[in-house]
Image (cartoon, coloured by chain):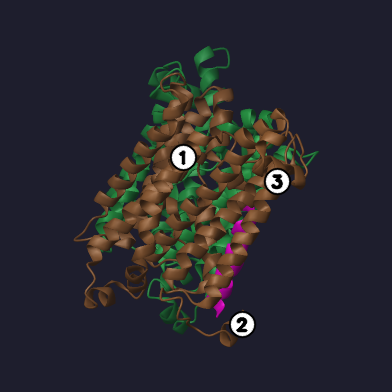
Chain colours: A green, B brown
Amino acid sequence: MSHGLRLPVWLGLLVAIGLAALLHLAVGAKSIPWSEAWQALVAYAPDNADQSVIRGSRLPRLLVAMLVGASLGLAGVIMQAVGDNPLADPGILGINSGAALFVVFGLLVLPGHDLSMIPLFAFSGALVAAVGVLLLAGRGHNPIRLTLSGAMIAALFSAITSILLLLDQQGLDSLRRWLTGSIGVTGGSMQAWVWPYVVLGMLLCLVNVRALNAHRLGPQAAAGMGVNLLKMRLFGLASVVLLSGCAVALAGPIGFVGLVVPHAARLLFGDDYRRLLLAAPLLGALLLILADIAARTVVRPFELNTGIVTALIVGPIFVALVLRKVK
Amino acid sequence: MTRLGLTLPRTLPLLPWVARPIDVIWVLVLMFALVAVSLYALTVGSYSLGVAQAWQALWSPDRVDSTMRNLLWELRLPRVALAILAGMAMSLAGLLMQSLTRNPLAAPGLVGVESGASVTMLLIIVLWPTLLPLELYPLAALAGGLAVALFVALLSWRQGISPLRLILVGVGLTAMLSAVADLLITYGNIDQVESALMWLGGSLHRAGWPQVRSLGIWLLLAGVPLLFFHRQLNLLQLGEKVALSRGLNVTGVMIFLLLCSVMLTAAAVANVGTMTFVGLVAPHLARQLAGDRHGALMPLSALVGALLVLAGDTLGRGLFPPLQLPAGLVVAIIGAPYLILLLARQRSR
C-alpha cells in the first residue's frame, strides 16, 4: 500500500458526494432543475413551491441517508477490525435485526412511549444481539462460525418479530415499510434525537484508532505494544452498538452497507485506520445517497425501500468477494 | 445417562447393526413420547375432545358420530401426521448439512433452498394468486428451492464441493433473496401478505392428506437411503482427507448427500413453510443421546425433530386460541435459547 496522502482521491470522493447530493435533491417524484436545487440551498425563497419541497422534505431525507450511511460504514470498519474478520457486517451478524426486534417490541407492547425512546430500544436490541453472536461464535477467529452465528441470531430475532406482527395486524401494516429499511418513513423528527449518539459513537472510534492500528498485526503483537485489548474490544463493541442502533432507529435494518464500505475504503486509501475511519463514513454516505436515488427513481412516482436496493446492489458484490477470497 | 451406558452391554448379538442397546431404549422412549403427544394433540383445539373419545374415534370410526369422525380424520389427524413428517425431514436435512460442513451451526436452509422456495411462493401468493391451483403450490416451491440450491452449488464449485464457499455463498444469496421477499411483503396487498407471512413462519394450518402423501413420498425417496450411508457420514466427520485415505469417493458422496438434504428441505418447505430451527436444534438434542455415531444418530434425530414440530404446533394452537401461531416460530423461540446455551457450554469445555 502506498503512503501518499492521495489528495486527488479524497477530492474526488468529496466532489462525488456533492454531486450525488445535488442529484438526490433534484430527482424524485417531481423533477426539479439543478439550478433550482442549488438556489434552495444558498438563497432560500419560501414562497417558491419547488424550493420548499427541497427544503421541507428532500433535504431532511438526504441528511438521514448520509447519517445512516456514515454510521453503517463506520460500524462495519470497527467490526471488521476488532473481530479481525473480513466478512463482518451489522446486517449479516444479526445486530440490525436485534435492534429492529426491540424497536418493534417497544412500539407495539410498551405503552406510553415517545420517539425519543426509539434509539434506546435500538441500542438495547443491538447490544443483546451482539453479545449473543459473540457468545455463540466463541474465541477462535473463525469467520465461518461467526457468520453462521450471526445468521442464526438474525433468524431468531426476525422469527420473534414476525410473531409480534402476526399478533397485531395493524402493527404489521404500519411497520412493514420501516422493517425493510426505509429512509422516507421517519423523516426529520428522529434526527434530532439520534445526532448525539452518532457523535458519541464516532468519538469512541477515534479514541480507539491507535489500538486498532496496532491490532492489525494481531492481538498478541498489539498486547506486546502496550494496547489494552479488553478496553479496545469494549470501546469497539460500544461504538458498533451505538452506530448501528442509530442507523436502525433512523431507517430500519439496512444490510450489506457495513460489509462493502470498509473493503472499498481499504482499496482506495490503504490499511491505515486513521484514514479508514475518515473514509468509511464518507463512502458509506455516498453509497446510501446513490442507493436512495435509485430507490426513488426506478419506479417513479413510487418508491422502493432503500434497504432492499442496497441488498440487491451489494449482495452480488458480497458473493463475488467470497468467490475471489475464499479458496 | 453415561452411567446407564456403562452398565448396559455395548453390543448385543441381535443388533448386528451399528446401534447400541442404549440407542434402542432411547428410540422406544421417543416413540412412546411421540404417540402420547400425538394423542394429546388430537384432543386440543376449538372443539375439544377427551383422550378416550379420540382413541375410540381412531380405532372404531363407525361407532362415533360423524362430526367427530370428520374432525378427527379430515382435520386433526393429517395435521399431526404432517407435523411428524415435516419434523423428520427438516431434522434429517439439518443433520446432513451439519455433518457435511462439519459445522454445528449449519442449518438446512444453508444453500438457499428455503429462501428460494419462499420467494417462489411469495411471488405466486402476492403477485398472481390465481396463477396456479392450490395443489400445485408445493411443486412450485420445490422447483424454486432446487433451482437456487443448484445455483449456489455451482457457484461454490471448485474441484469438488468446498463447504466453506458453500456456506458463505449461501449466506449472501439468502440475504439477496430475502430482500426480494421483503419487496413483495412491503408492497403486496396486506391480506395476501398476511397469509404469506403465516406460511413463511412454518404453519401447518393447511394440512390435509395430499400434503401428507407428498411429503411422505419425498421422505421415503430421500430419507430412507440415508440410513445406509452412516459409515460414509462417520468418515466425513473425520475430515475430507481422512475419508479420502479410507477409500471414500468424497465428491460423489457429498453430492449425493447434499442432494438428499436439499430434497428433504425443499419438500418440507413446500408443504409446511420454513422451519429452520428444527433442523438446527433437533440434531443437537439427538447428539446428546447418541454422540456422533450416525447410524443411531439419524433415526434418533428424526424422532426428536418430529416430537419438536408436533409439540410446537400443539403449543401454537393452544396458546392464543383463536389465533394459530406458526409451529416454526414456536420452535424457534423455544429452541434457540437452548441451542445458544448448548453451544456456549461446548465451547468452554
Q: Are marks 1 and 2 in contact (CB under 8 Å)?
A: no
Report the residue marked by disc 1. B213
Q: Nearer the viewer, residue B133 or B16?
A: B16
Callouts 3 and 1 in the same chain: yes
Q: Which residues are magenta?
A: B333-349
Q: Nearer the viewer, residue B87 or A106?
A: B87
The spot of residue A165 in percent (x, y) is 65, 37
Q: CA distance from mark 1 to mark 2?
A: 39 Å
Q: Residues within 10 Å of mark 1 (few under 14, many from 20)?
A: some
B315 displayed left or right of A269: right
A194 displayed left or right of B301: right
What amino acid is found at the position of numbered circle 3 in the picture?
Trp
Which chain does the numbered disc 3 sit on?
B
Which chain does the numbered disc 2 sit on?
B
Q: From this viewpoint, is residue A265 visible? A: no
**Local secondary structure at mark 2:** helix
Q: CA distance from mark 3 to mark 1?
A: 23 Å
Q: Which of pointers 1 and 2 lies earlier in the amino acid sequence? A: 2
Q: Dividing the image into 4 quarters, which one contains the C terminus of chain A?
A: bottom left
Report the residue marked by disc 3. B55
Q: Main secondary structure of the magenta part?
A: helix
What amino acid is found at the position of numbered circle 2 in the picture?
Leu
B109 displayed left or right of A131: left
Callouts 1 and 2 in the same chain: yes
Magenta region includes residue B211: no
Q: What residue do we see at 50% from left, 53% from top? A: B88
Report the residue marked by disc 2. B4
